[in-house]
Image (spheres, rainbow, N blue to C red):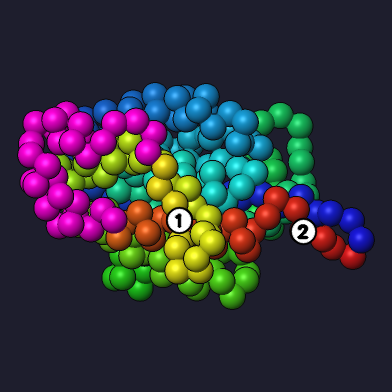
Amino acid sequence: MRAKELFCAIIADIKDSTKLPEDERIEVQRILIQKIEEYNHIYEDKLALKIQLSRGDAIQALFYSPVDAYSFICELRDNLFPVCFRVGMGYGDWYVRNSGENIHAQDGTSFQNAAKAFEKAHDKKAQEYNKNIVFYSGKEIDAVLNLLLAIEDGIFKGQTNIQRQLAQLYSERFALDAKLGKDELNIYAIHCNKGSLKEIANEMQTTRQNLSQQLKRGKIYDQRELKAAILVLMQTHFSKKDDEN
C-alpha cells in the first residue's frame, strides 16, 4: 500500500454577474483582484496552487485541505457581500502536474469533482433551494455536508447588515475550535481570544441586551454550530492522504 495525496479544488464565480451594470461590474472585479492578492498571502501555506482569477469573475484554487478551502469561501462570501458566489468544491487527487502555476494546465479527480460540484451549483434545482456552495467527493457523506452548507449559507443571507457585522466580530473574539468534545453532544469548544460580549457591545455602540437579541435573531449561535459540524465532518472524513493499493 502507498499513500495517495489528496487535495480540495474550488471553482467559483459571481452569481448573475452579467446582469450587473458595467461600472458596478468593473468595480466588483477591481475589489476581487485586490482581495485575491490578499488571500494568496493569508493562505499561502494552505495552497497547493494559488488562487487565480480568469474571465473577470471565475475563481479557481487548489487547497491541501477542504477545511481551509471552506474557510476561504466563507471569508470571500462575508467580505464581498452583497455580491453572491456559486462555488464548487471537489476532493480528490492531482495526477497531471504540469510545470508552472497555471491551474488550467493541471488535472486530477479534485479538479474534475470541483467541476461537477460547480455545475450542480448552477442548475435550476440548486438555485431553487439556495444551494450556492456544493461539495463533491463521491462519498455518501457529501449529501449531509451539502445540506449543512446550504442551511449555513441560508442563515448568512438572511441576516441583516448589523447581524453579519456582529457575526464577524464574534468570530474574531471567540475562536471556533471545531472538534468533538469529551461529551458526544458537545460539537465544539469556544475559546475566548480577547475581550467579551460587553466589549463587543461597546464597539458596536449598543447595549449588552440588544447584542444578545441580535445574536438570537441573526441565528449566530446556530450558524456557528453548523460551521463547526461542517468542519468536524471534513476533518473526520477527508484527510490529506488516503491509502491505496
Q: Which residues are magenta?
A: 192-221
Image-based side of 124 in relation to 89, left or right: left
Pointer 1 local density, CA inside 10 Å: few below 14, some 14–19, many at least 20: many
Viewer-nearest of labels 2 and 1?
Answer: 1
Q: Position of residue 77 (x, y in %)?
A: 34, 44
Question: Along the line of sight, which residue is nearer the eye, 125 or 181?
Answer: 181
Rendered-image quadrant of the C terminus: bottom right
x and y percentages locating residue 219 in the rendered image: 23, 58
Q: Main secondary structure of the magenta part?
A: helix
Q: Is residue 83 in view?
A: no
Check the image and report above or below for 34 versus 46. Answer: above
Question: Does the magenta run of residues contain 219?
Answer: yes
The spot of residue 170 in percent (x, y) is 29, 41
Image quadrant where one finds the N terminus? bottom right
Residue 242: image tag = 2
Magenta highlight on residue 87: no
* Position of residue 124 in the picture relative to residue 19 (left or right): right
Q: Report, in whole angstroms, how far the alpha carbon at label 2 lies from the one at label 1.
A: 26 Å
The local secondary structure at tag 2 comes to strand
Tag 1 residue: 188
Amino acid type at mark 1: Tyr
Q: Looking at numbered disc 2 in the image, what kind of residue is underneath it?
A: Asp
Q: Residues within 10 Å of mark 2 (few under 14, many from 20)?
A: few
